[in-house]
Amino acid sequence: MNRAVRVLVVDDHDLLRGGLTAILEAHDGVEVVGEAADGPTAVRAAQDLAPDVVLMDVEMTGGDGLTATAEILARCPATRVLILTMFDLDDYVFQALTIGASGFLLKTTPPDALASAVLACAAGETLLAPSVTRRLVETYVRRPPPREPEQLVPALAELTPRELEVLRAVARGMSNAEIGAQLYMAEATVKTHVTRILTKLGLRDRVQAVVLAYETGLVERTP
């Protein structure tokens, strides 16, 4: 039997934090190992508890979530951070992703989707909703210079044509299952391709792959 995914819930609103904890605890595959109401407490708890995933609020009165996210990722490299936000274009969100957060969730996320996202994050399958991915990256990533992607990131030249197809699909916010259906591959094969892509490009996770694909112009932004 697989062990439950261990989660630290961070939010400065007691009612919301308690609600998130209750939702996650109701899921068989998730165990909430701790709670924190501010950034510094979250950092200490992450070091003490070594959770698999931290659900991190970005705006807190007792220390912002961005600083806490950076410190947790620096001190606990095996821990992944999911950002909680009220707005899908919150300025804090993109900053969090660039410092290594594995994705973000809206606080309006349905309960079942919340638990699924936590499990996906722990499994390294963190995804951003396609609509939010496009809006986020198109808003914050600068338009790339008129050069070939391989000139901007030489390591892209090491990717096979199939891996480039997979990377473009990842950048559009598609899940492994969706990519497999589109490219006629088994989901496990897609996962292998994604792992190889991240390794070749020296990236932490899919979020960084999305940003790189847009920054280099590998995937073009819609007007």
Image (tube, rainbow, N blue to C red):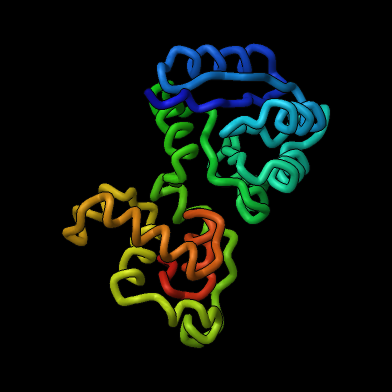
Which quadrant holds the N terminus? Answer: top left
Percent x, y of residue 131: 40, 49
| Total numbered labels placed on residues in the image | 0
Q: Residue furthest left?
A: 184
Percent x, y of residue 45: 74, 26
Q: Nearer the viewer, residue 181 or 146?
A: 181
Percent x, y of residue 141: 57, 65
Q: Is residue 126 visible?
A: no
Which quadrant holds the C terminus? Answer: bottom left
Q: Is 101 left, or right, of 221 in this rendering?
A: right
Q: Residue furthest front?
A: 1
Residue at left offset 43%, top offset 65%: 197
Q: Is 163 left, or right, of 45 in this rendering?
A: left
Q: Is residue 166 visible?
A: yes
Percent x, y of residue 137: 52, 59
Q: Is residue 200 above or below residue 11?
A: below
Residue at left offset 21%, top offset 61%: 183
Residue at left offset 33%, top offset 64%: 166
Q: Nearer the viewer, residue 40 or 49?
A: 49
Residue at left offset 49%, top offset 19%: 24
